[in-house]
Image (cartoon, coloured by chain):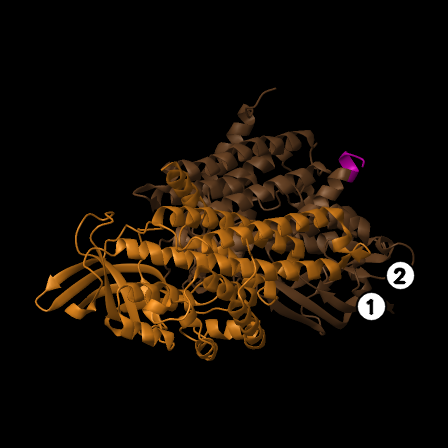
């Protein structure tokens, strides 16, 4: 048993924490939201220079990391800082899929900072990974794609999309899903900001791509998508943990400073007990993230059981932490100007990607009975 | 025990329904049901329609132009208007200031201000909270110093809801530092266009500009604008709060929210079936509905116990806690129900006449917005922590 980080990961954590503390500010996050694509290009360049995209990918795919605890260390720090980056989309999702498909050239570009988004969810798919109604039909020298993709994070900042499309089978069949590389200027985007920072887009597809755009084997993409999704969920849960740590610090500081009825409100036992409960739940969250990151390389059954266990627990604890922190702050916690709001909104939105608390509770019951 | 309305009460309910069918503009009910932002003109339009029927002063006695309704009639009216998606009656002039003026105001103040509230000549806002006086309201620091026949007011108020539309503000101000903090507070009526007043919007986490800071720098207020006696303002402030807390349970809002939630969960699909048929989600909806059914009766028990015109005491603290928590749970379930479409943050699309297209189904944008906005319910009007304190002192005598 050893829960300490390796020396390399400790160095990565220290360096990243220092860099983010100096380069991520609430003001910068607000300005980024209003800049049209929701991407902080200077921050992204800095993180690329530090090697973050490469640290998400294993050596056999051209990266220099890719372990579960690499993901945990990096995303916990991004969460702690409240940073808004496309690292999940471009490195963990698109990079993971392209790496598994042996697309070393594109993976190399991603490691160098190129932005690729993963367009998978659809207006009617909710959290079901198998529900793909976008269609790809063979043409003389390639494919024609038609359909709609929903809430594609960081799509507007990407120059390329990895798009899932059905090449055979019913709308919810696992078999028959394929992946295609599509240039961003070949699709129609409706871009918008999202709660908690960054942008997403609705994507309308009606475009032709060459035969070489097909990534991996036709119709066999589902297990790859499930693996990439597991890693993305782990990244997002680690980010949630970092967000919770900062929310905890902000709230404890506030309980110490805010005076009402002649004393700091942190002297009221009712609030002390609630803060103590929050602390216990955040430690549970940390253990759940460790469980998932430690099982990302396991077989599909064990891995997916941990995805659902951790995503469920993080969803529950995240809601508690965000709501309790706002409540204990009072009015100031409701304002856009004070730092808490950004962290609380970003944490709340964790439950709206990669399956929510209930989705994973039901899935855990099913998987653990198998 | 009889859980049914009397014939007379049922008749009144039918009368309210017929009125709403006839007089509530579909344009307004459509905005309310779709979670669109209401403008100043929207509120004024609805107030004027109610006033024309004599139904605006729902808590006021007839002698002041009110309805003279008892608590049950007020409840029926509230339930029916909420169900019909009518705009809410803004509480600042009608539910807050009006009762204080009737009980403690001078004859001149009553005859001048009360008709103006009903006619919509004045839009009042509330100057209670300050940066250092939230839950601890008695810690008011804004000062009013007597200078001849004026007070000179200096300080800052905050969380002033819809203060951007108001031409008048009623304020708690400090006129003395002798004795306990509660003893040096006065209740003052101030023109918002007085020189030295500055209103700054506070944007909330959902992007809504609904509250404000109001700054006072050497603002001259005639002594005739003092309500009651100097340094007795705490008594009037507390009286106002008991009226603020009538209908604090918000049963009608919760019922309307539950109906919307069920509609959303009936349309959203998960795993090839409507979310509402998913036992995990359906169980949560059922749980909150069961709580709401009981709370509606707790609310009616309180209403029945309160004699005509009398505001309930510490019972309203129970209703405030239970009512706000239930509404927040419904908001949280609606946010959960919309799934990935909870993420888009396009608050301009909630603006009337906006040409910004919504994202996803029409109910998705208001769901997240309402969830974040209504975190305020358990904070404002005396936080739920303060309400628990009231219950433990006043009812449990701990």
Q: Is residue B251 left or right of residue B145?
A: left
Q: Viewer-proximal residue, A230 or A35?
A: A230
Residue at 67 percent of width and 38 percent of height: B318
Disc sitting over residue B177 in the figure: 2
Query: In this orientation, does residue A202 appear?
Result: no
Which secondary structure lies at badge 2? loop
Specify few, some or many for label 2: CA neighbours under 10 Å numbering under 14, 14-19, or 20 or more: some
Residue A150: percent from the left, percent from the top?
Answer: 33, 59
- The quadrant holding residue A297 is bottom left
The image quadrant where one finds the C terminus of chain A is top left
- Check contact, mark 2 vs mark 1: CB within 8 A: no
Name the front one of labels 2 and 1: 2
- Image coordinates for residue A339, horizontal then vertical, percent: 60, 66
**Residue B88 seen by the camera:** yes
Q: Chain of mark 1?
A: B
Chain letter for orange? A
Horizontal side, residue B197 vs residue B138: left or right:
left
The chain painted brown is B
User: Rounded to the nearest whole Å, what is the CA distance between mark 2 and mark 1?
Assistant: 19 Å
Q: Is residue A252 above or below residue B294?
A: below
In the image, which residues are magenta?
A: B393-398
The residue that appears at 45% across and 62% down in the rendered structure is B345
Q: Which residue is mark 1?
A: B150
């Amino acid at each position: 048993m050893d829960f300490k980080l390796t020396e390399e990961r400790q160095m990565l954590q220290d360096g990243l924490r220092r860099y983010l503390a100096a380069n991520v500010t609430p003001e910068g996050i607000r300005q980024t939201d209003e800049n049209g694509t929701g991407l902080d290009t200077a921050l992204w360049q800095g993180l690329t220079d530090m090697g973050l995209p490469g640290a998400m990918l294993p050596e056999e795919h051209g990266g220099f990391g890719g372990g579960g605890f690499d993901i945990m260390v990096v995303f916990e720090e991004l969460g702690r800082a409240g940073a808004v980056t496309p690292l999940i989309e471009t490195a963990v999702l698109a990079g993971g899929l392209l790496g598994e498909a042996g697309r070393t050239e594109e993976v190399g570009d991603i490691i160098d900072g190129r932005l690729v988004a993963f367009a998978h969810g659809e207006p009617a798919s909710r959290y079901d990974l198998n529900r793909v109604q976008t269609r790809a039909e063979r043409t003389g020298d390639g494919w024609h794609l038609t359909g709609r993709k929903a809430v594609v994070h960081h799509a507007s900042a990407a120059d390329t999309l990895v798009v899932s499309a059905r090449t055979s089978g019913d709308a919810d069949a696992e078999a028959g899903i394929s992946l295609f590389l599509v240039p961003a200027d070949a699709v129609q985007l409706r871009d918008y900001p999202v709660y908690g920072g960054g942008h997403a887009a609705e994507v309308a597809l009606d475009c032709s791509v060459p035969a070489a755009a097909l990534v991996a084997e036709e119709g066999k993409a589902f297990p790859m998508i499930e693996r990439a999704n597991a890693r993305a969920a782990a990244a997002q849960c680690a980010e949630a943990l970092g967000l919770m740590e900062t929310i905890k610090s902000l709230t404890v500081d506030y309980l110490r400073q805010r005076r009402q009825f002649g004393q700091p409100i942190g002297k009221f036992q009712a609030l002390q007990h609630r803060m103590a409960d929050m602390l216990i739940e955040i430690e549970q969250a940390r253990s759940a993230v460790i469980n998932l990151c430690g099982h990302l390389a396991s077989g599909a059954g064990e891995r997916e059981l941990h995805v659902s266990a951790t995503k469920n627990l993080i969803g529950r604890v995240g809601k508690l932490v965000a709501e309790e922190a706002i409540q204990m702050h009072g009015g100031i916690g409701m304002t856009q100007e004070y730092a808490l709001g950004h962290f609380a909104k970003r944490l709340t939105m964790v439950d709206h990607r990669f399956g929510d608390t209930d989705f994973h509770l039901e899935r855990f019951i099913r998987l653990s009975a198998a | 025990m009889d859980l049914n309305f009397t014939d007379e009460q049922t008749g009144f309910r039918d009368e309210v329904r017929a009125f709403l069918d006839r007089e509530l503009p579909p344009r307004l009910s459509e905005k309310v049901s779709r979670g669109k932002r209401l403008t100043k003109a929207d509120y004024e339009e609805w107030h004027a329609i109610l006033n024309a029927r004599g139904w605006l002063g729902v808590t006021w006695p007839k002698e002041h132009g009110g309805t003279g309704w008892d608590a049950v009639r007020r409840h029926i009216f509230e339930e029916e208007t909420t169900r019909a998606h009518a705009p809410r009656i803004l509480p600042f002039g009608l539910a807050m200031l009006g009762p204080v003026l009737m009980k403690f105001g001078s004859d001149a103040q009553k005859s001048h201000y009360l008709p103006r509230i009903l006619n919509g000549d004045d839009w009042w806002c509330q100057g209670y909270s300050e940066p250092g006086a939230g839950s601890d309201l008695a810690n008011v620091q804004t000062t009013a110093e007597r200078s001849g026949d004026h007070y000179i007011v200096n300080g800052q108020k905050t969380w002033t809801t819809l203060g951007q539309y108001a031409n008048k503000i009623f304020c708690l101000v400090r006129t003395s530092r002798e004795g306990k903090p509660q003893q040096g507070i006065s209740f003052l009526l101030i023109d918002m266009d007085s020189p030295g007043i500055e209103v700054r919007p506070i944007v909330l986490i959902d992007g809504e500009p609904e509250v404000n800071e109001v700054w006072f720098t050497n603002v001259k207020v005639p002594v005739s604008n003092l309500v009651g006696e100097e340094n007795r303002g705490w008594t009037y402030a507390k009286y106002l709060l008991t009226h603020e807390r009538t209908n604090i349970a918000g049963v009608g809002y919760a019922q309307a929210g539950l109906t919307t939630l069920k509609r959303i969960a009936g349309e959203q699909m998960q795993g090839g079936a409507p979310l509402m048929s998913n036992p995990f989600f359906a169980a949560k909806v059922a749980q909150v509905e069961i709580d709401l059914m009981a709370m509606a009766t707790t609310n009616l028990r309180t209403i029945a116990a309160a004699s005509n015109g009398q505001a309930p005491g510490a019972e309203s603290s129970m209703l405030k806690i239970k009512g706000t928590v239930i509404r927040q749970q419904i908001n949280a379930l609606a946010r959960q129900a919309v799934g990935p479409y909870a993420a888009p943050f396009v608050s301009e699309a909630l603006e009337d006449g906006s040409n910004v297209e919504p994202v996803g189904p029409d109910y998705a944008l208001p769901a997240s917005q309402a969830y974040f906005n209504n975190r305020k319910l358990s904070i404002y009007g005396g936080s739920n922590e303060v309400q628990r304190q009231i219950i433990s002192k006043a009812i449990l005598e701990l």
